[in-house]
Every structure is written in C-alpha cells, then in structure tokens.
C-alpha cells in the first residue's frame, strides 16, 4: 500500500504543472484520520520519502466528519484521506475533489469481552457503541445488520460517540461491552490495555 500511494502522489504532483517536473514544490499538505489509511502518509513524512517532491510536508489530523468536511471545503490541503461516501457527497455539492485511489478495504470490525459473540446475529439485544453517527461506520454497519435480518432500531441498543477513540475508551474503562470499530488501530490498542478483549466480526 505504501509503494502504491507514494507512486500515486508522485504522478499526480508531476501532472499538476510542467514546472513540477524540474523543481520541487515548497509545501505539501496531506490530511488523514486516526486510522490505518494514514499510516503510509505518516511513514512517508517520517522517512523523507517525499523530499524530492516538496521542501516541506505537513500532516493534518482530522478527528471527526465535521473537521474532515471543513478541511475539504476550505481547500487548503493537497491530499486528504477520506471515506468514499463523504467524498462523493462533497463532490456532488461542488467541492473540487478528485478520487486518486481506494487504498484500504476491510478495516471495520467489532470487539467484545464476550467470547460467544461471533456473528452479527449474536448481537441482538446487545448494547453497541458506534462512532460517527450517519457517516461511514454507521452506514455500513446498519446495512450489514439489515442484510442479516436485524433491525438496528429495535434489535440493538445503539450508543453513538464522536470518534473511535471515545468508543475505545468506553470499552477499556468498562463503560461499554461491545463497541463497533472504525479501524484496526483502535482494537489493537485496546487489546494491549485489556488482554481479555477479543476482536469480533471482521467486517
């Protein structure tokens, strides 16, 4: 994934202007969430992989969908890691966004202390913490539930929080039994803090 993203960065930058083929740009700004999709971006910055492209590379963290939308609409970043549904909505509203690549798949999942919860149907009647209401994790989760014949409003006690980090903290502090996760990094962090936690239902 790192090599592919680096190649895409290079090709896009070189295509923006003929001048870029002969000299570096002064500043490159990339933005991303607290998620796996940002790891290659941070790695490229830390290792200087973009030093031949830009004199300075800045990473901006967006913590929730509102921050993401503000970044995209303001237009002061060169690249942004963004859920595809949000990108489509913003593009249809006239925001100047172009899709370069879908770099990450299969990073949605659940965690629980209950070893018997193995499938989505096992979660009927359970309390589930979900980050980013009405955005990607919530939309995908509800669609998967409906495919399994589960009514999200009647069959589950859904608790919404502002970010995956909040869901992780609720689980670690035992304020919730089963959060629903946005990315792999949060469950890994949870397991390090609470070894009795188990990843469930890799979505």
Image (cartoon, rainbow, N blue to C red):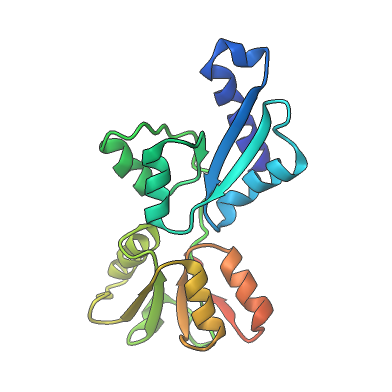
Q: Position of residue 43 (x, y in %)?
A: 70, 46
Tell me which residue sits at (51%, 33%) in the image: 78
Q: Position of residue 148 (x, y in %)?
A: 32, 71
Q: Is residue 55 above or below residue 69?
A: above
Count of marks, rendered view = 0
User: Which residue is more in the foreground, 30 or 141?
Assistant: 30
Name the residue located 33 percent from the left edge and 78 percent from the top edge: 158
- Quadrant into which the N terminus falls: top right
Q: As rendered, which of 33 and 145 lies closer to the eye?
A: 33
- Asked whether 201 or 8 is in front, the reply is 8
- Left or right placement of residue 66 versus residue 192 in this view: left
User: Is residue 84 among the parts visible in the rendering?
Assistant: no
Residue 165, position as x, y percentages in the image: 52, 69
What residue appears at the point 32 percent right and 36 percent down from the top-left corner? 91
Location of residue 85 in the rendering, given as x and y in whole percent from the top left corner: 35, 48
Task: Report the residue that reaches farthest toward the right.
Answer: 47
Residue 18 seen anywhere in this rendered image of the structure: yes
**Hey, which quadrant is residue 34 in on the image?**
bottom right
Residue 170, compared with residue 186, is above or below; it is below
Left or right of residue 124, residue 59 in this image: right
181 vs 28: above or below: below
């Amino acid at each position: 994934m790192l090599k592919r993203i680096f190649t895409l960065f290079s090709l896009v930058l070189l295509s923006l202007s003929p001048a870029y083929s002969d000299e570096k740009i002064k500043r490159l700004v990339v933005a991303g969430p607290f998620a796996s999709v940002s790891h290659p971006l941070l790695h490229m910055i830390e290792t200087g992989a973009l030093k031949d492209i830009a004199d300075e590379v800045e990473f901006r963290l967006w913590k929730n969908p509102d921050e993401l939308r503000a970044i995209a609409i303001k237009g002061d970043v060169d690249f942004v890691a963004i859920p595809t549904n949000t990108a489509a909505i913003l593009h249809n509203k006239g925001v100047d966004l172009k899709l370069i690549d879908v770099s990450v798949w299969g990073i949605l999942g659940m965690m629980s202390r209950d070893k018997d919860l193995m499938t989505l149907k096992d979660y009927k009647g359970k309390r589930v913490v979900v980050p980013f209401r009405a955005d990607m994790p919530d939309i995908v989760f509800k669609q998967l539930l409906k495919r399994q014949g589960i009514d999200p409003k009647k069959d589950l006690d859904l608790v919404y929080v502002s970010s995956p980090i909040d869901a992780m903290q609720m689980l670690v502090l035992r304020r919730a039994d089963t959060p629903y996760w946005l990315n792999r990094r949060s469950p890994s962090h949870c397991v390090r803090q609470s070894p009795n936690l188990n990843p469930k239902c890799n979505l």
